[in-house]
Image: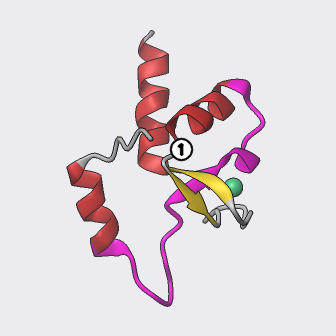
């Protein structure tokens, strides 16, 4: 299991998470069709549950900030 949560975004998630109106923070492979994005989600997913964006249930989830980090790294390469 590769938990790669950064301390700063973990803190942010707790501060912004509310019971009634949770922010859309997690995305899943159903959200994307681009192969690069699918790879990022597959390799970076660290939890499972309902997708905040497309509503898929029992899917591997990736925090959107991890997605942004991966995209930034990919662009630099
Ligand atoms: Zn999704």
Q: Residue 69 appears at what percent x and percent y?
A: 40, 34
Q: Residue 17 appears at what percent x and percent y?
A: 38, 76
Residue receiving disc 1: 45
Please rate how many residues cluster around mark 1, counting C-alpha atoms within 10 Å: few if below 14, some from 14 to 19, many from 20. Answer: many
Q: Is residue 45 left or right of residue 11?
A: right
Find ligand 1 in the image and state its quadrant: bottom right
Q: Picture quarter containing residue 76?
A: top left
Q: Picture quarter containing residue 53?
A: bottom right
Q: Is residue 43 left or right of residue 12?
A: right
Examine the rendered structure and indicate whether residue 33 appears above or below residue 65. above
Q: Residue at (72%, 61%) from the top-left corner?
A: 54
Q: Residue 4 appears at what percent x and percent y?
A: 35, 41
Q: Is-magenta flag for residue 17?
A: yes
Examine the rendered structure and indicate whether residue 8 appears above or below residue 49. above
Circle 1: element type: loop
Q: Quadrant of the N terminus?
A: top left
Residue range in magenta is 15-35
Q: Is residue 50 left or right of residue 63?
A: right
Q: Residue at (21%, 52%) from the top-left corner?
A: 8
Q: Picture quarter containing residue 41?
A: top right
Q: Residue at (73%, 30%) from the top-left corner?
A: 34
Q: Quadrant of the C terminus?
A: top left
Q: Residue 26 appears at what percent x and percent y?
A: 54, 57
Q: Residue at (49%, 19%) from the top-left corner?
A: 74
Q: Is residue 61 left or right of residue 56?
A: left
Examine the rendered structure and indicate whether residue 54 appears above or below residue 21. above
């Amino acid at each position: 299991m590769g938990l790669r949560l950064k301390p700063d975004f973990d803190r942010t998630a707790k501060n912004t998470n509310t019971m009634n109106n949770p922010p859309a923070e997690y995305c899943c492979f159903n959200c994307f069709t681009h192969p690069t994005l699918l790879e990022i989600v597959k390799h970076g997913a660290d939890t499972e549950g309902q997708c905040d964006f497309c509503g898929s249930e029992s899917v591997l989830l990736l925090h959107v900030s991890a997605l942004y980090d991966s995209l930034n790294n990919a662009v630099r390469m």
